[in-house]
Image: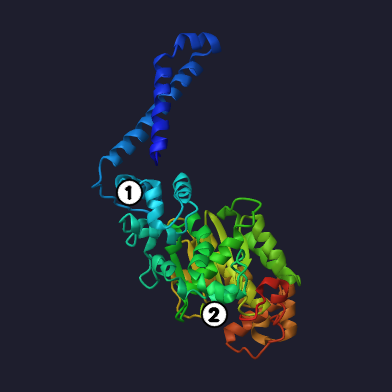
Amino acid sequence: MITNERQYRITKSQLAKLQDAADNFDLQGTINKIGSELFAKAELDALNSEIENLSKQIKEYETLKSSSEVVFNVTSFNDLPRVLIQARISKNYSQKDLAELMGLKEQQIQRYEAEMYMSANLRRLIEVANVLGISISNLPDLKSQDKDNPDLINILTNWSKFPIKTMYKRGWFEDFTGSLNEALKHGGELISDFTHPVINKSFVSLNRMHIRSASKLDEYALFAWKCRVISLALTIKPKTKFESKNLNQQWLRELVQLSQFSDGPIKAKDKLLEIGIVLIIEPHLPNTYLDGAAFLFENMPIIGMTLRYDRIDNFWFVLLHELSHVKVHLQKGKLETIYDNLDSENVDKIEIQADQMASEALIPKDLWQNAIARFTKTEKAVRNFAKKLQISPAIVAGRIRYETQNFSILKDMVGFGELRNQFPESICDDC
């Protein structure tokens, strides 16, 4: 795309040279030279294709320059970068003119346009759109798909509502070396930089979410946590691309059997990576009430777990619950984010199914119905049944405690205090 007069002149010169080369192309001579009619014609086709491409770019630029009353309709966030450039040209603003209106250097606008605004965060895109008189607040991509969830644009334009103090204390602003007061002062810039790698890579998916929670959530903290989890996940390279067929019953049985080892949660994280699923442990932020979440980001499943409860039985249930979402519910273009507060009884069909699948994967129903441990509730029976299934006794004890709603029994068998010490990243002062 031609973005300025200099490029326009260069492109016209290139077009003239290519047109001359095409007009004087000696097809027969080229065939004789390279010994192939097919490749000779391909060479001429390539010339004509480039001529057509440059001609379209020149025509578009000239049309924009001569049409100051063009109305630009932005129907998708992905179209926005091109529309911003078109609108600037149509208004007869040079890149220098726009830079001055924005309070930026001309070189910055040149870089933005050269890379189609890929390095610009959402706040900057909104600023450019406002200067050019383009409204993007009603873009479908920016509107929540759920009437009960906030619009993303409202979240990102109200940066002061983010838990900046907590994010600062946890070291989430990795390249920022200033004090807390300085972080609060520059909060808008920090939040934009913190969120934009996630937004720019997969913006449209961010509003396609499902939330299980009975409590009123802090949506700003929730979104910050999501960006943190995804950013960490993007630093990890799975060994293979995820395929749903690999997340089968046999694989899940092998996964659950890792629970019999003291470092089973660590082994589980590695096993997930082998089939293309990234597991990130990140403590929840205040007022989010999260146990876990499942994301589909650029076709990569990501599971985030908070270890809100430091118990072995809870780890395995949350993990299998989120894996159920990955297997059945996450779908590109439809549902790409699921947040779970598993204490919530405010459940729908999706959550009921994930609960059932997790329970079945941990302890098959046909084995559990007649298990002695289910009726005697003794430590010996729990250990014997767990040994038979080759799983952690914590899973069996946790099932009994949950089904009976008697949390005073078997409390020494569910692995209190044995989880977070396996994941140092899960330990924080404000969790």
Image spot of residue 204 (x, y percent) = 43, 57
**Which residue reaches farthest bottom?**
408
**Quadrant including the N terminus:** top left
Q: Nearer the viewer, mark 1 or mark 2?
A: 1
- From this view, report whether residue 353 is shown above or below residue 111: below
Q: Is residue 364 visible?
A: no
Q: Residue at x 39, y 69 (%)?
A: 154
Q: Amino acid at mark 2?
A: Pro
The numbered disc on residue 87 is 1
Q: Residues within 10 Å of mark 2 (few under 14, many from 20)?
A: some
Colour theme: rainbow
Image spot of residue 333 (x, y percent) = 43, 56
> What is the CA distance from the residue labelled 1 to the residue labelled 2?
42 Å
- From this view, report whether residue 376 is shown above or below residue 71: below
Q: Residue at x 66, y 74 (%)?
A: 426
Q: Is residue 19 visible?
A: yes
Q: Nearer the viewer, residue 304 or 64?
A: 64
Q: Residues within 10 Å of mark 1 (few under 14, many from 20)?
A: many
Q: Is residue 413 left or right of residue 18?
A: right
The numbered disc on residue 136 is none
Image spot of residue 372 (x, y percent) = 68, 81
Q: Earlier in the sequence, mark 1 or mark 2?
A: 1
Image spot of residue 266 (x, y percent) = 71, 67
Q: Disc 2 marks which residue? A: 286
Q: Residue at x 46, y 17 (%)?
A: 41
**Which residue reaches farthest left?**
69
Q: Amino acid at mark 1?
A: Ala
